[in-house]
Amino acid sequence: MTGWLDRLFPPFSARKREKPEEILYGIDERPPTSVLAAVGIQHVLLALMFAIYAVLAGQGIGLDDTEVAHYVGSTLLILGLGTILQAIRSRATPGLLFVFIPNPITLGAYIAVIVQYGVGAAMGGLIVSHLVIISLARFLPRMRPLFPPEVSGVVVLMLGVSLVTSGIGRSTGLIPAGELTAGAPTVAAATIACIVGFSVWGPRPLRTIAVLLAIIVGMAVAFATGVTDLAAFREIGTLPVFAIPFLAVPPPLPEFVPAAILILLLVEMFTAINQFACGLTMDKLNDAKWRRPDMPLVSRAVIASSATNLLHGLTGTLSSGFSSANIGLAHSTGVMSRHVGFVAGGLLCAIAFVPVIPGLIVFTPAPVIGAILVYTAAFLIVAGMDLILSRMLNAKRAFTVGLSIVLGMSVMLLPELVEEAPAWSTAIVESGLTIAAFSAVLLNAVFRIGVNQRAEIALSGGDAGEAAAAFLEHNGKSWGARKDAIMRAGISVGEALEALNEARIVEGPVTLAASFDEFNLVCRLRYRGSALQLGSEETVDVSTILDEDDEAALDAAMMRVSSVLVTRMADEVRASERAGRAELVLRFNH
């Protein structure tokens, strides 16, 4: 039994961490009750802003406004339970402050599957997808080559593009009125202006709630311009004060439709990779001496996230994921304590039983919702571009990005292209996001064929440093390494070669062997001779040495400078010697 658990769940181990200076309360520290309450409420308010995605999901599958309010309440209950689950520390849960929000990445595919195959098929697709992800949680790091940043960037960028129609439609009154509505653009413009104003020029406390403040301003402008009135909120009064989630809109039984499972599995795999990245971020933010990721911790975060999404599958609600905005809020407040997760999760669960609060979100004026979607679309498009350009691009990776976006956009701009597609494929081919995602994954896999993740070069002469930098840049493009990692490696290898030359311990040429595995870039300098003695980081007074005109002392000082630069630029440095063969290993976190 224990062996089976060890294979499914990573063994629990508490790693020692050093709290960064900017963090007031670390992972396991319990803040005072007043701080817990204040920070927990902020996290809930921020999460409620993103409940708009649950509103869009409910409207997209054909629910009326009252049913959507209950649907949002049911979604909030699962979000709260998931947030609490992440805060618990066990061999299956990480004990971290992760607040859940409805998953915008799944939104389009979720609605498409329900329209084509029904709610039961979406439920079955989510259940199977996350059972698969739980079984693969420990192996997700090995799957990173299939979902590199440029592929994830295409998905994020196309997600932003897919929100443009809905956002502009609501901002202008085309949705739901079907025609331009006077005053709607004014309301949308005022809302966007407030989001931008508070986010760019507001003090830090206001930046974290910029969207909430913009909603309040947008609603005020909507009332002032007559775009909406109190009658629009009359249905909120028909909602009960207390209601048990899932009873008003009971879910059907799950159905297991292969096409639906395939669609949602692909999209949810992208979500799992994103959850993995969020786990790495939280791991790094909470350790001042972070050197390498705590993989068991991150795997537990992914497992707990998929367990939460199994509940979404069983209840017929839109899947969820970690909120990167809430991670930013935790870091900006300096309160990273997992105990905040219990407070925030508990509040979300409590709100789920009060339909009036989800009702306020549902009956928010359409131009205000449209403005938020336009803001979200702009943010996602830029975030996708940033992801794509975070890696060095060669022709293969450029074609992967460009062709995937073109194929996805062609379906969005020319829907008649897929009018004659078979019924079973409609949910796939009608979604530009899904087409772009499939294309990016497939092209990335094809272009990776024949790419060797290891390379080496013999270096000699006075231009060895330049040759090493050019070698690393060339292979970095083939591997899709980050520009900053290749730059650091080039500088560090150059300084290492300088230090070896100054030490006069090398006999013959130096061989540079580089390897890359998505997590580490490793450079090995091999040569005949003795191991390089890595110097201490003592201060070198170059001006005094120059005044004394001592060439030997100057050479020794410059060697120490090169040695210090090598140790500071690389994340790990090792020097060794055996039978007259020496090796200097430089490792760079990626």
Image: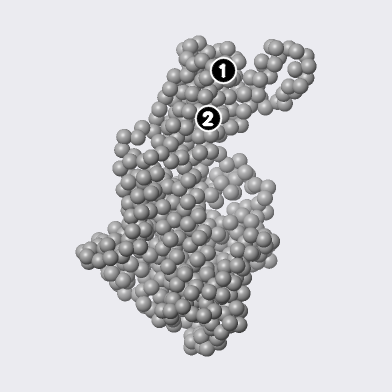
Q: Amino acid at mark 1?
A: Leu
The numbered mark at residue 364 is: none
Within 10 angstroms of label 2, few (less than 14), some, or many (20 or more) residues? many
Numbered mark located on residue 490 in the image: 2
Residue 530 percent location from the top left of the image = 53, 14
- At horizontal 67% and vertical 50% (from top left) the residue drawn is 22
Q: Is tag 1's residue or tag 2's residue first in the polypeptide sequence?
A: 2
Taking depth in this image into account, of 81 and 118 the one nearest to the observer is: 118
Q: In the figure, 399 relative to 462: above or below?
A: below
Residue 379 visible (yes or no): yes
Q: Is residue 398 above or below residue 315?
A: above
Tell me the residue that label 1 is attached to.
Answer: 500
Label 1, label 2: how many angstroms apart (C-alpha)? 15 Å
Q: Residue flagged by tag 2: what amino acid is it?
A: Gly
On screen, residue 433 above or below 139:
below
Depth order, front residue of 239/25: 239
Q: Is residue 256 something that shows in the picture?
A: no
Q: Nearer the viewer, residue 99 or 492?
A: 492
Residue 78 as seen in the image, left or right of residue 342 = left
Which residue is pictured at 31% across the width and 65% down the height? 415
Q: Are marks 1 and 2 in contact (CB under 8 Å)?
A: no
Residue 476 x %, y %: 45, 35
Secondary structure beneath dot 1 equals helix
Query: 209 or 13: nearer the eye?
Result: 209
